[in-house]
């Protein structure tokens, strides 16, 4: 069983390595670093290194690889670390000029199990990536204009997923989410609930439905990320998840 950070990194790296390369994607890619991967899809939120340092302590040559990878793309080097990894390798990172960057994330994990469906919320798989992405954007931003980076990120999340799902209440689309499988690990990500339907069990059923799908695909455990102590984490805890780490980002 590999650590959650390595599973997440492997999921994105496999997607990037299997994409068709054209003029618009030539700068995208992934490079292995100490158990994780430096990842890049230009003009999205996927421009950071995840899982690095999960197999051994980071060395200066690992940092050199990451800085060269992002430097070639005219991007700053950025890492997302489990808190324990960052504490261990922090002296070297600070010496090289890395500073804290961005919010903290909570990593939650659970054994995969198939629970009962919620009667009021229907969840169905969809192959319509465009409609799914528009729904997630609406769930995240409501009536506000969706920033181009956020919309492009959502389309990439849709393209990478093994399964996309949409939740509905009384025939109205209320939210959506994505599922990826890496080895025995189900990666639950990109969940969103339309503001008008929040507080009605939609997020919880999006979790439960993806766990049921993960069972069918042979996964043995699941992971997701969310804001610490947010409503989404509380719902996940009620569905059998346990917080196993905090993630922090640093940037040079």
Image: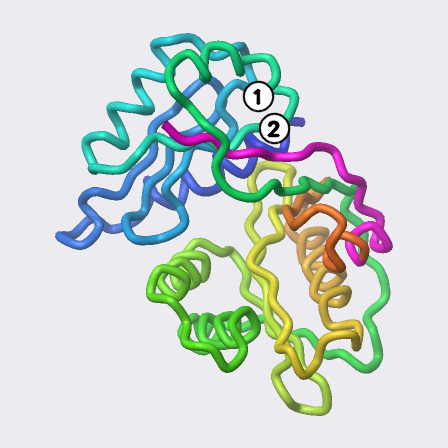
**Left or right: 37 as drawn, with respect to 214:** left
- In reply to whether residue 246 is colored magenta, the answer given is yes
The label shown at residue 86 is 1
Q: Secondary structure at mark 2?
A: strand
Percent of width and height locating residue 31: 34, 28
CA distance separating discs 1 and 2:
6 Å
Asked whether the beta carbons under mark 1 and mark 2 sit within 8 Å of each other, the answer is yes
Between 239 and 225, the one lying in front of the other is: 225
Q: Nearer the viewer, residue 188 or 104?
A: 104
Q: Residues within 10 Å of mark 2 (few under 14, many from 20)?
A: many
Left or right, residue 60 beside residue 231:
left
Name the residue beneath numbered marker 2.
Answer: 82
Rendered view: 139 above or below 99? below
Q: Residue at x 16, y 52 (%)?
A: 22
Residue 235 position, x and y percent, is: 80, 58
In the displayed image of the protein, which residue is found farthest to the left?
23
């Amino acid at each position: 069983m590999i650590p959650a950070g390595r599973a997440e990194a492997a999921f994105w790296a496999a997607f990037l390595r299997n994409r068709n390369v054209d003029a618009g994607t030539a700068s995208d890619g992934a490079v292995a670093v100490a158990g994780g991967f430096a990842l890049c899809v230009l003009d999205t939120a996927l421009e950071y290194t995840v899982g690095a340092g999960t197999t051994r302590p980071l060395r200066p040559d690992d940092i050199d690889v990451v800085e060269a990878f992002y430097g070639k793309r005219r991007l700053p080097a950025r890492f997302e670390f489990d808190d324990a990894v960052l504490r261990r390798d922090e002296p070297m990172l600070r010496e090289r000029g890395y500073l804290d960057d961005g919010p903290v994330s909570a990593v939650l994990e659970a054994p995969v199990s198939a629970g009962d469906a919620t009667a009021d919320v229907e969840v169905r798989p969809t192959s319509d990536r465009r409609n799914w992405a528009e729904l997630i954007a609406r769930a995240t931003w409501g009536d506000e204009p969706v920033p181009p980076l956020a919309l492009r990120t959502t389309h990439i999340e849709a393209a990478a997923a093994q399964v996309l799902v949409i939740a509905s209440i009384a025939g109205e689309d209320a939210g959506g989410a994505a599922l990826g499988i890496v080895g025995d690990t189900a990666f639950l990500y990109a969940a969103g609930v339309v503001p008008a339907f929040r507080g009605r069990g939609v997020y919880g059923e999006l979790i439960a439905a993806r766990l049921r799908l993960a069972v069918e695909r042979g996964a043995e455990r699941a992971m997701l990320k969310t804001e610490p102590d947010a409503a989404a984490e509380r719902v996940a805890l009620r569905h059998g998840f346990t917080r196993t780490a905090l993630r922090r980002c640093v940037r040079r």
